[in-house]
Image: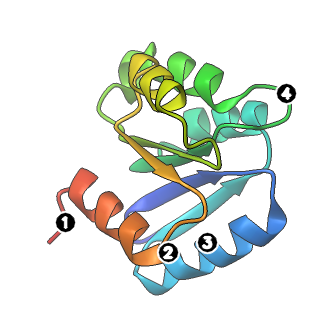
Amino acid sequence: MGDKPRILLVDDEPSITKVVGKRLELAGFEVVIASDGQEGLQKAQTLSPNLIILDLMLPKLNGFEVCTMLKGDARFQGVPIILFSAKAQEKDEKMGKECGADAYVTKPFKAETLLEQIRTLLHLA
C-alpha cells in the first residue's frame, strides 16, 4: 500500500478516469477508480481514501447523493470531497456545498487546477 495519499476517483467516463488517474499517479497519488455512485460508496467505505473526486452525473447514485451519504457518516466528515462536473451553473455549485462537498471543479478542467485543489485540501505543499 505505501504512504502515498489515496484518492478515490468516481466517474463513469473511461476517458476521464484514464487521463485524470494517470495525472494523479504521476503527481504521486495512489488512485482507486469506481465507475458508478454505488461502487464509489462501497470503495470509499472499504478503502478509506484520503480524498474523493466525484462526478455528479453517475449511474445508480448521483454525485450529490454519494456526497450526502459520505458526509453523513462520521468516518468521512474529515475526508475532502471534490465534485467534478460539466454542470457549471451556480445552482449546481450551491447544491454541492449543501451536500457537504469541499470543492467544485468544472469540466473541462486544467490538470494543474485540479492538482492544486487536491494539494490544498490535503494540506500538501
Residue 78 in the image: state x and y as whole percent: 29, 32
- The amino acid on which the numbered mark 4 sits, given as a three-letter code, is Lys
Q: Residue 108, relative to residue 19: is it above or below?
A: above
The reply to whether discs 3 and 2 touch (Cβ–Cβ < 8 Å) is: yes
* For marks 1 and 4 on the same chain, the one whose residue lies earlier in the sequence: 4
> At x 53% / y 52%, what residue is drawn?
106
Q: CA distance from mark 4 to mark 3?
A: 22 Å
Q: Secondary structure at mark 1?
A: loop
Which residue bears the numbered disc 2? 24
The quarter holding residue 59 reads top right
Residue 2 in the image: state x and y as whole percent: 41, 72
- Mark linked to residue 60: 4
- The amino acid on which the numbered mark 3 sits, given as a three-letter code, is Gly
* For marks 4 and 3 on the same chain, the one whose residue lies earlier in the sequence: 3
* For marks 4 and 2 on the same chain, the one whose residue lies earlier in the sequence: 2
The reply to whether discs 4 and 3 touch (Cβ–Cβ < 8 Å) is: no
Q: Secondary structure at mark 2?
A: helix
Q: Secondary structure at mark 4?
A: loop
